[in-house]
Amino acid sequence: MAMGRPREFNADAALDSALQVFWRKGYEGASMTDLTEAMGITKPSLYAAFGNKEELFRKALDRYVDGPGGYYQTALQQPTARAVVEHVLTGAADAMTDPVHPGCLAVQGALCCGEAAETIKQELAARRAKSEQDIRDRFARAIADGDLPAQADADDLARYISAILQGMAVQAASGASREQLRKLADMALRNWPPV
Amino acid sequence: MAMGRPREFNADAALDSALQVFWRKGYEGASMTDLTEAMGITKPSLYAAFGNKEELFRKALDRYVDGPGGYYQTALQQPTARAVVEHVLTGAADAMTDPVHPGCLAVQGALCCGEAAETIKQELAARRAKSEQDIRDRFARAIADGDLPAQADADDLARYISAILQGMAVQAASGASREQLRKLADMALRNWPPV
DNA sequence: GTCCATTTATACCGGGCGGTATGGATATGT
DNA sequence: ACATATCCATACCGCCCGGTATAAATGGAC
């Protein structure tokens, strides 16, 4: 059987370009024209390879989580709660301050939006909730292990760290420098764990 | 001289309705149709009374700062740095968790966007920077007064509080409850001032 | 009661949106 | 060499965007 003409572009490289556009402009702010121009392909090629705008965003988001956002998963694997927090805060300070795409896709991709992007907004909220859940479970284990004080509350600690990370994302989107975010991370670390 | 036909709607009430729409959907996500329907007026009336979409947003933002966001200014006038922080954190927890419009307009109004909203994005970033500057000045005064430890850094403290507030805004936009944000505020307060 | 500035409603504008139909180009399997 | 499956480019779709021209309705000033 014939295999047909092979595509002329690299799907992974194109997806990376799309990720950058979504990261800078958000889901609603990124037009199909923005995306095809950055990806170097035409609209029919995009739709054939990635479905539609929503699916393209989801695939870019997956790539984000495994790539630039990968510091979160590696942080969770650190041996102590302090090492987890240290890794996640410094990792965030670095990942969020690339001037090409400041901030965090999971925060600014669709924090609020019109009806058309409601699904994406909910997907992002669910992913943030999942991340908070993951670090909550990690802290609960640390409490059980005696790695964190017995009277510590995993829920509160997880919400606190999530808020710091999301605050860093807003600061980065507003133009904060890597040094500024690192000082913020250091301050949170000096006071870890908060009583 | 003739005065002309008086307008049939209340401009302040209409602006409040517009504010709610912008708060829920952001600048880009709020269409003129969304706005006119919520305000109960037609497009020509809106343009005659408020200019265009961008000016309407700016006027809604002013109204937000003086109304629902007023807790920030009153917080700055509290007598001690601790009272300032207590007031701003609890005020934020309350203001950001009205289910009709969760979160903070100054954060989610245009955190990132397409070219068309770039001006609004910069305006919001400038307002956030101004707010951070205000609380930094307040902390600097507290350090000079001996109200905060002499080795405290007003820059770091201001960035820290700003990040907590912005983190709360993201949490609220994701559906966090008033109780959850209050626990977050309490935790930050128990550790105030961070060393 | 008439004039007239202003607001109102309707209907419309060009343009960009996300998405697609069509047809020619191209490499593979036979 | 040929048939086939797929990709690429162009041109187009209906729709909604922000914004406006036009003209009728309105009510105060004289």
Image: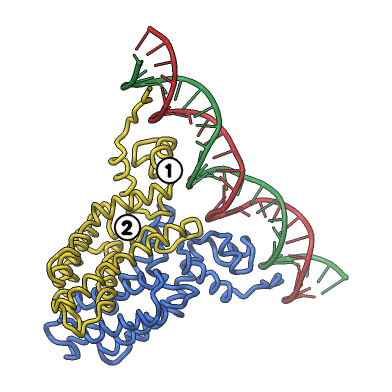
Chain colours: A blue, B yellow, C red, D green
Q: Position of residue B87 (x, y in %)?
A: 16, 65
Which amino acid lies under the numbered mark 1 shown in the image of this protein?
Answer: Gly
- The chain to which mark 1 is attached is B
| Residue at 49% in and 70% down | A59
Q: Is mark 2 on a helix, strand or loop?
A: helix
Snapshot quadrant of residue B92? bottom left
Residue B142, percent across and down? 17, 74
Q: Do labels 2 and 1 share a chain?
A: yes
Q: Mark 2 points at which residue?
A: B105
Q: In which quarter of the image is the C terminus of chain B?
A: bottom left
A87 versus A10 height, above or below: below
Spatial CA span between label 2 and label 1? 20 Å
Q: Which of A180 and B147 lies nearest the eye of the viewer?
A: B147
| Residue located 24% across and 69% down the image | B135
Lateral position of residue B115 relative to residue B24, left or right: right
**Is residue A132 rendered to the left or right of residue A155?**
right
Reading the image, the residue beneath label 1 is B51
**Residue B109 left/right relative to C12:** left
What residue is shown at x 25% (from left), y 77% (from top)? B154
Quarter of the image with the N terminus of chain B is top left
Q: Which chain carries label 2?
A: B
Q: Do the residues labelled 2 and 1 touch (CB within 8 Å)?
A: no
